[in-house]
Image (cartoon, rainbow, N blue to C red):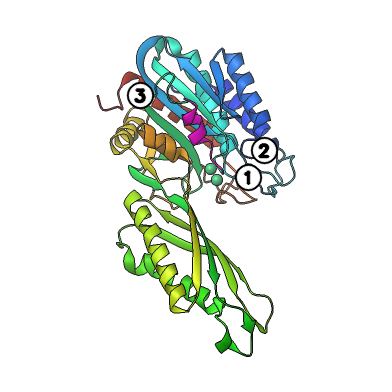
Amino acid sequence: MIEEVPAPVAERVIEIRRAIHRHPELGFEEHRTSALVEAELDGLGIEHRRVATTGVVGVVRGAKPGRVAGLRADMDALPITERTGLPYASEIDGVMHACGHDAHTAMLLGAARVLQETRASFEGTAVLLFQPAEEGPGGAEPMIAEGALDDPRVDAVAMLHVDPRIAPGEISITPGPVNASADELHVTVRGKGGHGAYPHTAVDAVPAAAAIVLALQTIASRETDPLKSVVVTIGTIVGGYRNNVIADEVRMTGTLRAHDPAVRDGLEARVRRIIDHTAAAYGATAEITIVRGYPPVVNDAALAQKFASYMREQRGIRVEALPPTMGGEDFAYFAQRVPGVLVRLGIRSEAAGSVFPGHSAEFRIDEAALPVGVRTLVAFARGVGSGAILNQ
Ligand SMILES: [Zn+2]
Ligand SMILES: [Zn+2]
């Protein structure tokens, strides 16, 4: 079958993944990784161009006409010190591929090779989207702004993310929302300082802040439809000077998350109302800043369903439909522009130690999963190219 991954391709994918793993780079600093991607594409005779500083867009043109599939892989690492002890562990202190983006990049290069080598029978075009800075500040938006989806015009886009909830050989495709919006909350509660022995002469910012933290919890428990998902987390709280001084100021930061864009908008208004009025109830004031982050990732329902059936029936791959998560992912911007599908790639294996969640210093990947990822990307390109998984 065309989508079987030849052994030399599978071996090369692992070799590339380990090379990237040894030299992880943070967002918009993926110079070495981009150069590796470009060298590999050059070796395959695949045209490419730079976008968004360290982003690379490659184009594989099938010999037969068809539709255009976008395949996206993120390339950046995290500011984490690796503790896996693997022979190909990070050689860069304090930087680690702990989210699998090394594997995502390597699998996309493997898919590029398979598509290029079988282009005589490939109806359509594959646009390879090697993206910087997924972990922040975000490379998808600048890639799109620089025309990554426009030349040629992409009809549908897919990405893989490794996932330790399912085993190698399995993938998961869930229609609808799969990742949440991730907005930052910054609050400064202001009162009036004073002597700790004379509270009546001051306005204490500490109980006002405490009341705000508790009141915010009612957004999820009392104000949101129990069948919708929201997260309101206060992650930091800092204020005061010493035990016998009344604090004039408390600063807090948090994250606000939702799957539904309408719920996300409502969340912002509710947070502002509760903070403003709770502060006022304590005679304090509050300055609130909400910085909008990535929108929710919403898999196109029809595309997701068709691709899941296609993988099951045409490719014999076991396809789960895992529940969505409240994590963030800037693939959301691609999926807002064209029908998109985020595919989760099973990596869970006790034997390979591939059991840790992403962003753990112990994060490992069972590399047996990688050829399955290559097959999935190739199948998406062919399924879109022929129109088999698109609404005609
Ligand atoms: Zn991550
Ligand atoms: Zn990731």
Front position in the image: 376 or 324: 324
Is residue 388 shown in magenta? no
Image: 250 above or below 110: below
Q: Position of residue 86 (x, y in %)?
A: 70, 42
As drawn, which residue projects farthest toward the left? 392
Q: Position of residue 155 (x, y in %)?
A: 36, 25
- Magenta span: 136-147
Residue annotated with mark 2: 24
Separation of marks 2 and 3 at Cα, in angstroms: 32 Å
Residue 272 quadrant: bottom left
Q: Amino acid at mark 1?
A: Leu
Q: Amino acid at mark 2?
A: Pro
Residue annotated with mark 3: 384
Asked whether the residues under the numbered discs 1 and 2 touch, taking CB atoms below 8 Å apart as contact, a structural biologist would say yes
Q: Residue at x 62, y 32 (%)?
A: 17
On residue 277, which mark appears? none
